[in-house]
Image: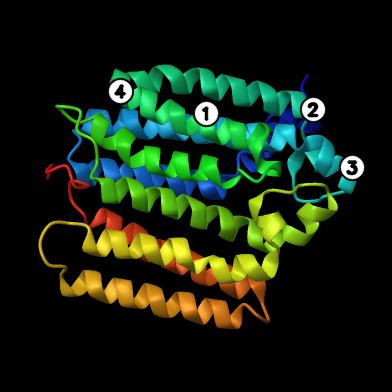
């Protein structure tokens, strides 16, 4: 007979796995890619494949990150992570990461060989960040590669396998760099204490706070001014808003680093809106 305590074990492990996959970034990146696929004109079946590939890729990345960081989290007594809290073992998270990656590969190539190669390049860059590059001066590079590869994954899955416009790729890379800076900013001091010396940690919180708006606003400018023809009022308003928010975040961030991070999130949201309003991502698709 199964006791009530025993029956809750699988549920607890599933909840712990869900907490270990970095659900916030997973939902955001997967939803953004699904929206890009619809905007670019992918058929419903291809949209599902694209979304499934990104979902499994993001699961593998999140689980890899938590499994690899398990020793550091345990050593520093970090709370709020399932492995450090003792609700799941690192080996179980590793198993989930490799299983998700094994699913990601065929799903990616089901979208086409070139599209699959683009997406797996993004996934490989993220794994390289988790396993090695996070603690080096090149920590920004995986973010730039991965964020630029996502719109390429979408458009290369269209008939004719078109590449997105150069300004879409450049804006994606800049958004990735901004996401890296914003994600690390609140944790720089703690990272330094545990020996993580990536690019933002080497710069220090004050320099990162001042630098953070630059890639995001530059991405806004590319997305607003990149499409053919004169920019519309909506695009110019979004660009102006991004600049104002970035300046406000930099000023307020002198006292509260979370304010700079919140401003970066708001600018990134405007950039995403501009990207989605780009229709065919510069390929001519509708």
Residue of label 4: 114
Residue of label 2: 3
CA neighbours of label 3 inside 10 A, class few (<14), some (14 to 19), many (20+)? few
CA neighbours of label 2 inside 10 A, class few (<14), some (14 to 19), many (20+)? few
Q: Does any portion of residue 204 appear in the rendered image?
A: yes
Mark positioned earlier in the residue sequence (1 or 2): 2
Q: Nearer the viewer, mark 1 or mark 2?
A: 1
Q: Nearer the viewer, mark 3 or mark 2?
A: 3
The answer to whether 108 is drawn above or below residue 265 in the figure is: above
Mark positioned earlier in the residue sequence (1 or 4): 4
Instruction: Tell me the residue at 78%/36% (across/down).
Output: 70
Q: Nearer the viewer, mark 3 or mark 1?
A: 1
Disc 4, SS: helix
CA–CA distance in space, label 4 to label 3: 42 Å
Q: Are marks 1 and 2 in contact (CB under 8 Å)?
A: no
Residue of label 1: 124
Mark carried by residue 75: 3
The answer to whether 262 is drawn above or below residue 148 in the figure is: below
Mark carried by residue 72: none
Disc 2, SS: loop
Disc 3, SS: helix
Percent across and percent down for residue 13 are 70, 32
Percent across and percent down for residue 192 are 80, 54
The quadrant in which the C terminus is found is top left
CA–CA distance in space, label 3 to label 1: 27 Å
Instruction: Tell me the residue at 43%/44% (across/down).
Output: 147
The answer to whether 182 is drawn above or below residue 279 in the figure is: below
Mark positioned earlier in the residue sequence (4 or 3): 3
Q: Are marks 2 and 4 in contact (CB under 8 Å)?
A: no
CA–CA distance in space, label 1 to label 4: 15 Å
Task: Give left or right: position of 218 versus 82.
Answer: left
């Amino acid at each position: 007979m199964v006791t009530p305590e025993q029956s809750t074990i699988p549920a607890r492990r599933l909840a712990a796995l869900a907490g270990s996959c970095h659900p916030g970034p997973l939902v955001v990146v997967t939803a953004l890619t699904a929206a890009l696929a619809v905007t670019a004109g992918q058929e419903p079946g291809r949209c599902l494949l694209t979304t499934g590939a990104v979902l499994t890729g993001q699961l593998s990345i999140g689980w890899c990150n938590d499994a690899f960081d398990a020793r550091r989290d345990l050593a520093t007594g970090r709370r709020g992570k399932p492995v450090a809290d003792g609700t799941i073992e690192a080996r179980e998270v590793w198993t989930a990461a490799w299983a998700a990656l094994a699913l990601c590969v065929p799903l990616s190539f089901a979208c086409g060989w070139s599209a699959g190669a683009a997406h797996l390049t993004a996934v490989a860059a993220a794994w390289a960040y988790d396993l090695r590059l996070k603690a080096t001066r090149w920590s920004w590079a995986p973010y730039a590669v991965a964020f630029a590869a996502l719109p390429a994954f979408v458009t290369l899955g269209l008939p004719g396998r078109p590449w997105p416009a150069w300004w879409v790729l450049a804006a994606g890379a800049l958004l990735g760099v901004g996401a890296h800076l914003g994600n690390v900013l609140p944790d720089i001091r703690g990272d330094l204490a545990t020996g993580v010396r990536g690019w933002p940690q080497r710069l220090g919180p004050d320099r990162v706070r001042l630098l953070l708006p630059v890639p995001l606003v530059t991405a806004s400018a590319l997305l607003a001014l990149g499409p053919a023809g004169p920019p519309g009022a909506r695009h110019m308003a979004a660009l102006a808003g991004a600049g104002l928010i970035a300046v406000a975040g930099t000023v307020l961030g002198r006292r509260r680093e979370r304010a700079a991070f919140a401003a970066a999130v708001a600018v990134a949201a405007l950039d995403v809106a501009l990207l989605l309003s780009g229709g065919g991502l510069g390929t001519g698709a509708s």
